[in-house]
Structures are given as C-alpha cells and as structure tokens.
Image: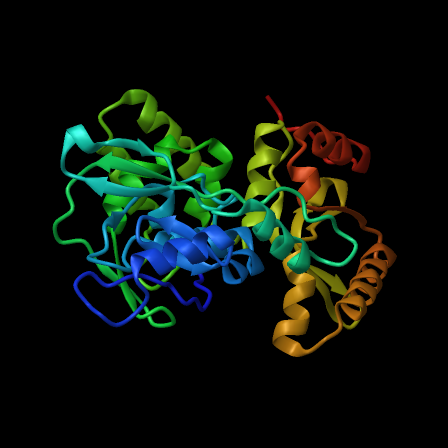
C-alpha cells in the first residue's frame, strides 16, 4: 500500500501548544477539516485530492497517529504488505484479543460541512468528469485474534509504525474467505514475490497453510485458488483475467508467450492460445500512465506503439483479442468477447 504525504491534525492531551479541541471542532464544522476518527483530523483538500486507495491508506494510518498501532489483518494486512487487491476494501481490519470488542464499528462523521466539502470535491474533479457524491469513510472491523509479536511496517512519509499480522497467519485467516478471483489475485503475487520483502511463499508452503484450515470447505476453496495461482501473471488485471477465463469455462492460456518473427521476437504477450493461434492482451490504464511516470513517454504515443505491435503480431498470422477493466467487471460481456475472438472452451 502506498501512502500519500499528509498532515494529520490532533490536539495533544495536556499540552498548551497546538490546536485546542474547540478550534479543531470549529474548523471541522467550517468544512476545512475532515474527521477520520475521534481526535484525528485531516485538511479537507488533502483528503479529497487523492484516489480512493489514498483515502483508505490515510484511514488506516489514522489509527496509529495518537498511539500504538493496532495489528492489521485480512485485506488491510495484505494491502499493507504490498499485495494488490481488485477493489479498495470497505473496512479497515485489525485484531482484538477481546471477544466482546469484535465486530464492525461505524466511522465517525467524516464531514462537518458537506456543502463546503462538496465545493472542494468539485474543484479537484477531473476536467470533463462530474464530481459525483462525496467519498465515504471506512468502517473499522475488529477481528478476534492474537496480537503479540506482530511485525512492524515503517511508513517514513508519515513518520508512523504500523503493525501487521504475520504473513502465514494473514494468509491462513484471509485467503479462504475471499472470492475465487480475489484469492487468485493474491496468491499469484505471493508466489511471485511482487509484494513487499518477505511476502513470498512457495506453492508447497501455501498448501501447508491450507492444510491447517479446520474446515473442509475452507480447505477446498483455498486449494482451488492455489491450483490456479501462477507467478507469471504480472498484474492484478492479468490475474483477474485468468481467474475469469477459468471460471467461464475457457481453455487455460499460456502466459508471457513470445511471438517469433523473421528477425527475432516480435512481442511477449499476456495470454496465448496456441491451438487457435490467438493472442490475448489485458489493457490496464496503468500501462499508459506508467509510460509517462517512468520513461517520460506520452501515453498517446504508447497507444500508437501498441497498435503497431498488434499489427506485427497479426502479420505473422495470429489473431489478437484485447480487453479492459470494464470487461472484467462484466463477466457475461467478457465471455462474449472471448467467444467472438475464437478462444476455445475447456474440455469437460
């Protein structure tokens, strides 16, 4: 999980310096601050300027601003370990050793002046896009579990230390609870090591974790995801695509296949069905944005280069089918797209 720079505002108990509780409440009611939790505020402009993931990260961090960090678990713990998820979680998950305290907690009132916040929100909305409703806050979800000996994650940009559940326990407690697509997305990254340092396990280690699950149904769910997991998937979108291809009954593609040409390889493709001589490509927006962030290449130029690359692939006698995030969100549309392209069905 990436954390944006932020300026949390609190009122230190017993200190004369800094803003008073009255002053914070006044600024909150004027719409200049949002309240992430009791006693912890953030300038409204900072809260609204980022992405949904930025707001989630700041909500997670706010739990450690005025005291010791709780131990984060489930999807929150996975995200803190650098494991990409399909969606921003709806809750901030952390552990409690007390059964009577387990359960969900509603977020505090986030906006003290919704009209003022809406004006800020309209100002940061992208040109040509309506601002839509104000972003909501996130609930805390306290899960029963042991909290001692948990690793710490330093967040230098915020000057905070966050505690995260140990990886094996995190996977043990989380993967079998996820939808199949989400579990494959997570396990692909755990096998490949694309998360943070130490967030890597072999297939055999994952199977041992699975074997500890007390429920036969839980073991079956995790085992099915382990069987499909593949470290060669290079993004959340590719992993999600492969999970959907499997669930929709299509033949499993080869991953990262190289297309040969007269003068060497033409391309390394996301997906390839050799029997149909068909290439599949997932087009995530990140591909085009990163081209500018990392290499200074204009995204429009990347689009042109992708089209030329596709033309070279087709010139060698291969078909090409492409899809985007919105296709994955609509499985019936994705299935129809693959059928039209000639992706073979899996033998039953």
Residue at left 20%, top 60%?
13
Give how far across and how far down residue 32 sits, in percent.
50, 59
The C terminus sits in image quarter: top right
Instruction: Name the one closer to the observer, 286 or 157.
Output: 157
* Residue 81 falls in image quadrant: bottom left
Q: How is the image coloured?
A: rainbow
Report the side of 100 relative to 50 (left or right).
left
- Decide if residue 57 is in sight here: no
- Decide if residue 316 is in sight here: yes
Report the side of 233 relative to 142 (left or right).
right
Give how far across and how far down residue 55 sits, in percent.
48, 53
Report the side of 152 relative to 231 (left or right).
left
Q: Vertical placement of 298 versus 146: above or below?
A: below
Q: Give the number of marks.
A: 0
Residue at left 63%, top 59%?
286
Q: Vertical placement of 10 versus 83: above or below?
A: below
The N terminus sits in image quarter: bottom left
Instruction: Name the one closer to the observer, 22 or 218.
Output: 22
Task: Residue at the far bottom: name it.
Answer: 296
Instruction: Name the one closer to the observer, 65 or 203.
Output: 65
Report the side of 66 relative to 130 (left or right).
left
Residue at left 18%, top 53%?
150
Residue at left 45%, top 69%?
5
Give how far across and how far down residue 288 sits, in percent.
70, 63
Give how far across and how far down residue 166 sits, in percent.
23, 51
* Residue 256 falls in image quadrant: bottom right
Instruction: Name the one closer to the observer, 172 or 161.
Output: 161
* Residue 265 falls in image quadrant: bottom right
């Amino acid at each position: 999980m990436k954390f944006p720079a932020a300026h949390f505002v609190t009122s230190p108990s017993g200190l004369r310096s800094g803003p008073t509780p009255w002053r914070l409440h006044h600024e909150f009611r004027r719409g200049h601050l949002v309240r992430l939790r009791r006693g912890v505020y953030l300038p409204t402009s900072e809260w609204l300027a980022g992405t949904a993931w930025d707001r989630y990260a700041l909500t997670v961090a706010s739990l450690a601003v005025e005291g010791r960090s709780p131990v984060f678990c489930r999807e929150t713990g996975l995200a803190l370990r650098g494991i990409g998820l399909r969606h921003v979680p709806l809750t901030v998950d952390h552990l409690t050793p007390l059964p009577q305290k387990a359960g969900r907690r509603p977020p505090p009132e986030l906006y003290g002046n919704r009209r003022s916040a809406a004006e800020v929100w309209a100002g940061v909305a992208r040109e040509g896009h309506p601002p839509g409703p104000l972003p909501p806050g996130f609930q805390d979800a306290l899960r029963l579990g042991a909290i001692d000996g948990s690793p710490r994650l330093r967040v230098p940009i915020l000057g905070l230390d966050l505690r995260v559940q140990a990886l094996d326990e995190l996977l043990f407690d989380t993967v079998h609870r996820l939808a199949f697509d989400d579990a494959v997305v997570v396990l692909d990254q755990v096998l490949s090591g694309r998360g943070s340092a130490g967030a890597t396990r072999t297939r055999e280690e994952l199977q041992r974790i699975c074997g500890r699950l007390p429920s036969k149904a839980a073991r079956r769910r995790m085992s099915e995801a382990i069987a499909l997991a593949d470290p060669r998937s290079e993004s959340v979108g590719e992993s999600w695509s492969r999970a959907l291809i499997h669930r929709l009954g299509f033949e499993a593609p080869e991953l990262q296949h190289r297309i040969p040409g007269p003068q060497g390889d033409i391309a390394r493709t996301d997906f390839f069905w050799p029997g149909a001589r068909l290439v599949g490509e997932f087009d995530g927006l990140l591909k085009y944005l990163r081209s500018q962030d990392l290499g200074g290449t204009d995204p429009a130029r990347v689009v042109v280069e992708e089209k030329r690359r596709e033309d070279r692939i087709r010139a060698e006698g291969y078909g090409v089918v492409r899809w985007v995030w919105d296709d994955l969100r609509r499985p019936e549309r994705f299935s129809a797209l693959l059928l039209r392209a000639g992706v073979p069905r899996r033998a039953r």
